[in-house]
Amino acid sequence: MLTIAMPKGRIFEEAAELLRRAGYKLPPEFDDSRKLIIDVPEENIRFILAKPMDVVTYVEHGVADLGIAGKDVMLEEDRDVYEVLDLKISACYLAVAGLPNAKAVSVAPKIATKYPAVASRYFREQGEQVEIIKLNGSIELAPLIGLAERIVDIVSTGRTLKENGLVELERIEDITSRLIVNPVSYRMKDQFIDDMVERLSACLEGVN
Ligand code: PRP
């Protein structure tokens, strides 16, 4: 049996749709169940539903053989997992944003983000000294209430920035979801995993 860690939330729907397109028969209750473990015996697959940031942890520890994780999480967390396929779903990007016409702060401006490692690396590469403030969500609040001058966050439709009067300042990196694999599972269950990768790749062909 394969265990797959699925991210709850906005990636879930697209991931489930992709698995169905690849021919996996997922039961209807898959979509709006509150269950955290869903067995699909017909496919010999167990799904576990985790927070997106935790999917990599389940896979790294081997309690899930595979997982679907955003590239944003992979960039933030240096984990011992293999990234085997770009699923090309949940496309978005990481960007620096802030209030329009904000006055430049001369020494170490504050940057609020859910991605402290990505943000530190980015500003180091830019040669700018900043102070990183880690938040867990609603990052766009930070400049509005004076916690930080700028933010580093995911932009998808751009609505959250717009509706909060923020502007994108720099684009950091494009993000899509990836299929990740535990290294031991990859050796022990290679046939099943290769089969899944092939089926998913086949339905991704032609998708840019
Ligand atoms: C993400 C991201 C932005 C928003 C971007 O937040 O952190 O806030 O989505 O999407 P948009 O460009 O389509 O508006 P999420 O909904 O995951 O919530 P959280 O960051 O508050 O946890």
Image: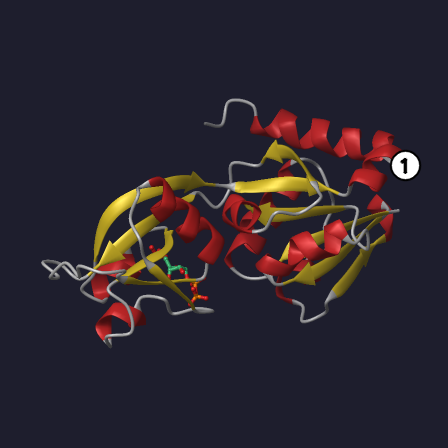
Whole-percent x, y for residue 173 in the image = 39, 40
Residue drawn at x 71%, y 26% is: 198
Left or right relative to 188: residue 110: left
Residue nearer the viewer, 96 or 199: 96
Q: Residues within 10 Å of mark 1 (few under 14, many from 20)?
A: few
Residue nearer the viewer, 156 or 143: 143
Whole-percent x, y for residue 154 in the image = 39, 53
Image quadrant in which you'd find residue 170: top left
Image quadrant in which you'd find residue 99: bottom left
Mark 1 residue CB less than 8 A from any atom of ligand 1: no
Residue drawn at x 81%, y 35% is: 186
Asked whether residue 93 is in view, the answer is no
Asked whether residue 202 is in view, the answer is yes
- Write down which quadrant ligand 1 falls in: bottom left
Viewport quadrant of the C terminus: top left
Whole-percent x, y for residue 35 in the image = 72, 69
Residue nearer the viewer, 97 or 108: 108
Q: What amino acid type should be assigned to the residue bearing mark 1?
A: Met
Left or right relative to 8: residue 139: left
Whole-percent x, y for residue 185 in the image = 84, 41
From what the image shows, is residue 197 above or below residue 73?
A: above
Left or right relative to 179: residue 72: left
Q: Give SS at disc 1.
A: helix
- Check disc 1 and report the residue beneath it: 188
Q: Name the residue at the bottom extreme.
A: 145
Residue drawn at x 44%, y 42% is: 91
Residue drawn at x 49%, y 41% is: 176
